[in-house]
Amino acid sequence: MFWGFGFWPLLPLFWIGLIIFFCWGASRWFGWRDRRGPISAHYDAPLEPNALEILRRRYASGEIDGTTFEQMRERLERSGRPRD
C-alpha cells in the first residue's frame, strides 16, 4: 500500500493537459479560428473594384474630364459584351 510521491506531482499537469486538449479539439471541431464574428465577416476580404468603378472614381476625383470619361466608359461597355 505504498502511494508515496510517485504519480501525485504529475496529476495537476495531467488535468491541465487534458483540458487544453479538449479546448483545442473543440476549437478545431467548431472552427472558432475561422470565424471572427458577425461584424468582421463583412469586412474580411474587400472586393477588388472593377474597371468601371475605377473609372468612376477617377472622374469623381477630377483625374479625367467628362469627354474622356464617356469615351472610356463606352469602350468598357463594348468590351464587356459578347461579340457576334
Image (cartoon, grey):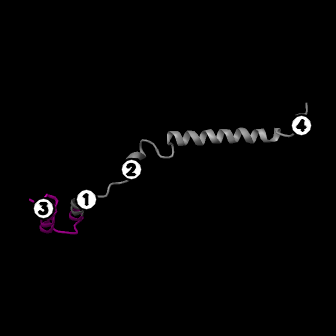
Nearest to N terminus: mark 1 or mark 3: 1
As measured in the structure, the alpha-carbon distance from the residue carrying label 1 to the one carrying label 4 is 73 Å
Which residue is found at the position 20% from the left and 64% from the top?
A: 59
Question: Which one is nearer the viewer's eye here, 20 or 75?
Answer: 20
Q: Is residue 80 magenta?
A: yes
Please tell me whether mark 2 or mark 4 is closer to you in this view: 4
- The residues tagged by marks 3 and 4 sit, at their Cα atoms, a distance apart of 87 Å
* Amino acid type for the residue under numbered disc 1: Asn
**Residue at the spot of label 1:** 50
Per the image, the residue denoted by label 4 is 4
Crowding near pointer 3: few (<14 within 10 Å), some, many (20+)?
few
Which region of the structure is painted magenta? 58-84
Mark 2 or mark 1, earlier in chain: 2
| Image-based side of 70 in relation to 26, left or right | left
- Residue bearing mark 3: 78
Query: Helix, strand or loop at disc 3?
Result: helix
Question: Cα distance, mark 2 to mark 3?
Answer: 32 Å
Q: Residues within 10 Å of mark 4 (few under 14, many from 20)?
A: few
Query: Could you tell me if the residues under marks 2 and 4 are in contact, i.e. CB atoms within 8 Å?
Result: no
Q: Nearer the viewer, mark 1 or mark 4?
A: 4
Element carrying mark 4: loop
